Amino acid sequence: MPLIRRIPKRGFNNSNFKTVFAVINVVALEHFESGSTVDEEALLSAGLIRRPYDLVKILGDGPLQKKLNVVADRASATARATIEKAGGTLLIK
């Protein structure tokens, strides 16, 4: 039997199984008070993300002047350095 007849005509679609990230820049965290804890619920209530996502990732774009306790699923190296330079902590779940 030829190869073209053995290959399925409808393929696999990975869109049902992909992981959706909420990407937040460090400069957006200036919205919170100094010393507060920033997690997914806090980001939702502040309006920085619109709906619950699978994972939250913090990127290091921009300055941060406030001491914050950030809880996220992933973070870039520059985001970690920026948060710790401001005196805050970053907890990776």
Image: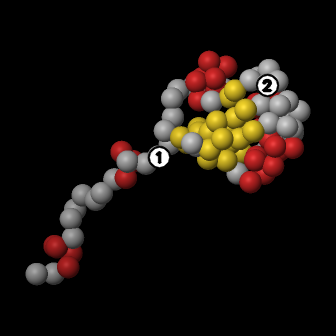
- 61 with respect to 43 (left or right): right
Callout 1 environment at 10 Å: few (<14), some (14 to 19), or many (20+)? Answer: few
Report the residue at 22% width, 62% height from top: 9
- 14 with respect to 77 (left or right): left
Closer to the camera in the image, 86 or 45: 86
Compared with 1, 92 (above or below) is above
Callout 2 environment at 10 Å: few (<14), some (14 to 19), or many (20+)? Answer: some
Tell me the number on the disc at residue 19.
Answer: 1
**Disc 2 secondary structure class:** loop
Per the model, the C-alpha gap separating discs 1 and 2 is: 30 Å
Q: Does residue 75 appear in the picture of this structure?
A: yes
Report the residue at 80% width, 20% height from top: 33
In which quarter of the view is residue 25 placed?
A: top right
Image quadrant in which the N terminus is located? bottom left
In which quarter of the view is residue 59 placed?
A: top right
Which circle, 1 or 2, is nearer the viewer? 2
Report the residue at 43% width, 48% height from top: 18
Closer to the camera in the image, 3 or 34: 34
- 28 with respect to 49 (left or right): right
Where is residue 84? Give x, y as percent: 81, 43
Q: State the residue position of label 2.
A: 35
**Disc 1 secondary structure class:** loop
Q: Amino acid at mark 2?
A: Gly
How many callouts does the rendering have? 2
Q: Residue furthest left?
A: 1
Compared with 38, 78 (above or below) is below
Q: Amino acid at mark 1?
A: Thr
Q: Does residue 31 appear in the picture of this structure?
A: no
> Do the residues bearing badges 1 and 2 touch, measured as CB atoms within 8 Å?
no
- 47 with respect to 21 (left or right): right
Report the residue at 16% width, 73% height from top: 5
